[in-house]
Amino acid sequence: MSELKNDLSSLKIDRDRPAASPWRWPLLLLVPAILVIGGLYGLRVRQALASPEVETVRVTVSSNASDAPAGTPMLSASGYLVARRKAVVSAKIQGRLAILKVEEGSRVREGDVIARLEDADYLASVERAKAEVQRAEADLAETQRQLRLADRLNAEKVLADDQKDAASSRVRVADAALAQSRANLGFVEAQLQNTVIRAPFTGVVVKKMAEVGESVAPIPPGVNISTASGAIVALADLDTLEVEADIAESNVAKLSDAQPAEVAAEAFPDRRYKAVLRQVIPTADRTKATVQVKVTILDKDKDLKPEMSARLTFLEKQQPKTATSAPAAPTVSVSKDAIATRDGQPSVFEVLEGGKVRQRAVTISSERDGQVVVKQGLAGGEILVKSPPAGLKDGDAVRLKG
């Protein structure tokens, strides 16, 4: 009887037990799928973060001559800015500096007073010379009076001819003494004027070489500005600023009269100044096998200073256009920062869709103002990696800055 009760109780339905959810198995299948997708996404993110971050530049095309650089670089040299007209100003006489009216950077005109020397002794000499002139004039007047008297007495047969001639000789001696006194006066007045130092030409004071109270003296010509002793100031005409550079003997034949050029001062590397060849020195330096050239700067400004280092680039002369001239071929150019060397050849890395790069070999010709002319390998409009990393290779993924 008890076994029958147990069997019947096992067949009883338990209505308090919760029913099984119909979403249980779909959820169990969805969770692994989410984990797999998340893992793949994390892997992609890690790969992207591992890719190098680069900047890009675009290849440009100049379709006509007006967009192309004016002249192709043909020869470069290093030199210095110098003023064609310059001078170390000193006094003509030795003396002590009493007044100095200029400083470095002062602009002066021709004839302006730069400095004065102590002149008390020269003023005294001038006064003494003036007194000597007055005495000589008085002596001359007296001898002339005596000559007139001698002439009258000689005419009356009172005075002998010899005495008359003696009176005439004294007049000539007095006249010579007066001329000598006047010459001496002119000399001491010139010495007094030499105590005033004037600008020999219009220019700028580039160096002050003496102070008030120092002794100055005449200096020989051709002295170095930095080592001149006894000079007062160094003066330069900045309107005559030019570049002096040494070029190899083998390159002299490439230059001709009025050869166009560009000048870039080391202090302002982003600026370019138009220039033209003025002179090729007609002698060479046998120790260096070079020839010096002088180039005039056409559009100089106030920032250029003498003795600055400069980079000189000679340009090929452009041929004048004619009615039958063919149109200029398009010029493809790109920043020189995009050019890399791979296996000894110039190459660039083009950025493709999807963030990968493609290595492309190029043939380059000339460089100017940071731009390189590409003769083969690019058509224009491509986006290239700027300053490619050393380990970048074809097919690598990159991230673009910004």
Image: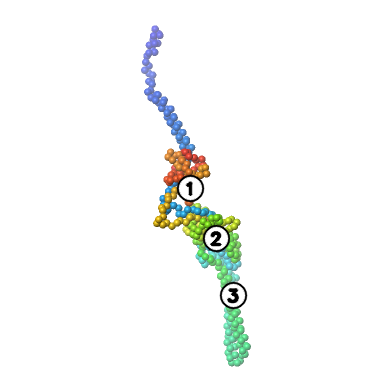
Image height check: is 76 above or below 154? above
Quarter holding the C terminus is top left
State if disc 1 and disc 2 touch (CB < 8 Å).
no
Q: CA distance from mark 3 to mark 1?
A: 77 Å
**Point 61% across, 84% down: residue:** 169
The furthest residue to the top: 1
Residue 201 seen from this side: yes
Mark 2 closeness class: few <14, some 14–19, many ≥20 residues within 10 Å: few
Q: Position of residue 343 (x, y in %)?
A: 52, 42
**Is 51 on the left or on the right of 18, as rendered?**
right
Mark 1 closeness class: few <14, some 14–19, many ≥20 residues within 10 Å: some
Which circle's residue, 3 or 2, is located before the other in the chain? 3
Q: Nearer the viewer, residue 318 or 229?
A: 318
State if disc 2 and disc 3 touch (CB < 8 Å).
no
**Point 44% across, 52% down: residue:** 68
In the picture, the disc for residue 364 is 1
Which circle's residue, 3 or 1, is located before the other in the chain? 3
Q: Amino acid at mark 1?
A: Ile
What colour-coding does the image apply?
rainbow
In the picture, the disc for residue 184 is 3
Give the mark toward the camera: 3 or 2. Answer: 2
User: Hey, which quadrant is residue 157 in on the image?
Assistant: bottom right
Q: CA distance from mark 3 to mark 2?
A: 46 Å
Q: State the SS at label 2.
A: strand
**Is 351 on the left or on the right of 171, as rendered?**
left
**Point 60% across, 85% down: residue:** 168
